[in-house]
Image: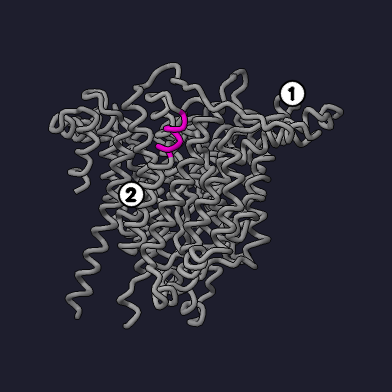
Amino acid sequence: MNELLDIAFISGLIGATMRMATPIIFATLGEILSERAGVLNLGIEGIMLMGAMTGFLVTFTSGSIWLGVLAGAGVGMLLGLLMAFLAVYLGLSQHVSGLGITLFATGLAMFIYRLHFGSPTVPPIIQPFKQITIPLLSKIPVIGPGLFTQYSLTYIAWLLIPALSILLYKTKIGLKIRTVGENPVVADTVGVNVLLTRTLCLVAGGALMGIGGAFLTLAHQNMFLIDVIGGRGWVAIAMVIFGNWDPLKGTFGALIFGFLDALQLRLQGLGIAVSFHLFLMIPYLLTIVALISVSRKASIPASLLKPYRREEKGG
Amino acid sequence: MTLILSAIPILVAGGHLWKSYYYLFYGALGTRFNLLETFVKASPLLLTGLAVAFAFRAKFWNIGAEGQLLAGALAATVLGIHMGSVPQPLVLPIVIISGFLAGGIWAAIPAILKTKFKVDDVVSTLLLNYVMWHIMGALLFGPLQQPGSSWPRSAAIIKAACYPILLPRSRFHMGILIAFFAVFVIWFINQKTTFGYRSKAVGVNIKAAHFGGINTTSVIVWTALISGGLAGLAGVGELCAIQYRLIMDISPGYGYSGIVIAMLGNLHPVGVLFSSLFFSVIIVGAQTMSRMTGVPSYIAEVIQGMSLMVMLIFLLFTEYKIKVTKK
């Protein structure tokens, strides 16, 4: 047990928690943005996989890792646009449109990967992101090395959390977004373009989801595997509810998830006999338990799932 | 329409278009074996499609058919290995019923969470897929692992627990008949029973159903039980007729395909029957197409996703037309 209390262990655990939480933070923020504008985007799992695949493919061919990140974001935006076309402009069921996008994007990601790489026995790899150590801050005892030796995308994720909070709660744009999600009729009356706002939120949210996926193939791992996302998109959906549609609280959920994920890996590394399957189950179970406790007082955006059609207003 | 759209990825892959379509359909329907194989592939798709359609009809958003399928397969494995001392004719019925129950109970959990705690059913059914997958993994690396094997796989089930093969020189098994029979049963429940009516009423307007004196909680939980049970049967079929032992990838995502199939079939059992056959043609045919033309077989998934969207847009336009004529 002494090893568990070792400072190096704790510090390593903190670092791993942050790494494991990063893709979920990106995805959760993207989903919060979409849902605040009134659209549940169940395409998230597929968008993340496309982001992961595209990011990897572009980095592999171009050699530029940031180009890969951009490509991941770009493909996320395109799929966000597709979601907007189906769910916002055509007013189709958000559940079905989102699931359709996930299925379509999942198939497409694997199709393109196979097309480009065939089925090699050894998966192709890229030179992934290197961790950046921030001077001084990383010298803080215990927490410093873990928190401040991270991938640049992780730092970006942490900057995005307050950025999204400020955008949603302190700016005019945020007020518009929230009004569109709560009461589109009011928004429309005061001159906010409901459909355009929702579209832009889906596109921007899609970009975040795509980057979250790209993080997995460009930093967390250096290759693309079919199960690379492994349900992290669905976890993000749960974290949005868990965090009551608030960026800070949602991040907190993502951190818990990252912590359990990291702890499981560390315990295995120490040779402590835990069934890794039983351990990996815990985050999902905890999420469900958390949902039971928060769902009763959830402040769900009032117009989530409701398509908006202007002509229906006048009757 | 979907077939026209799917020309794009085929062409991008550098495949010869007509040759690709020819092999797609030849591979699925061209020979006796391939045709029967299309039915073999259709049976789990049909069952998960029915499972999802039945749940969606009551607006119980069951995205968890995959986990319910695994639950059914798991129950069938445990019983299928250990029932050597049970009289042989009883083994298969017990396996089938417990597979149905396992899937049903796994679906009833999110239904109870939804009705009692207002937990979003999309999220809970999804998360439970992963929970079930990890339960299966823990068992296959632990107590269920085949003695002496280092792979995560169980021992083989006993002969009496296997579905009989109905046609020689093929894999056309009893589970296919069960799946077809399930189409009839669901149609009957939907059209001819009060439960089917209540389930639909809950789906159309849960508040109205409640004020109309329907116990909506009980209707949702029972709908979930039946839905999950059907998915569980798909798992039993894959185990007792195809694999004969539990492995981690017993389902290549049949539960998720079931969602698309249910939507394509417009949530109607007969529609689901046709869309599952359509999907099965594409999946089986894509194998041959891939071998003959080099177009990756993942084209099947791409076509599935595209067909759903085309269908959605198509449905929207038909709906719109009806509205126009009414005016």
- According to the picture, the residue beneath numbered tag 2 turns out to be B180
Residue A204 lies in the magenta-colored region: no
Q: Position of residue B303 (x, y in %)?
A: 28, 42
Q: Position of residue B316 (x, y in %)?
A: 26, 63
Q: Going 38% across and 53% down the picture, which residue do you hit?
A: B50
Q: Position of residue A159 (x, y in %)?
A: 60, 46
Viewer-nearest residue: A134 or B192: A134
**Depicted A3 relative to depicted B35: above or below:** above
- In the rendered image, which quarter is residue B266 located in? bottom left
- In the rendered image, which quarter is residue A242 located in? bottom right
**C-alpha span from label 1 to label 2:** 50 Å
Q: Is residue B182 in sight in this rendering? A: no
For mark 2, name the chain.
B
Q: Going 52% across and 34% down the picture, which residue do you hit?
A: A216
Q: Which residues are magenta?
A: A65-72
* Left or right, B265 with reference to A238: left
- According to the picture, the residue beneath numbered tag 1 turns out to be A271
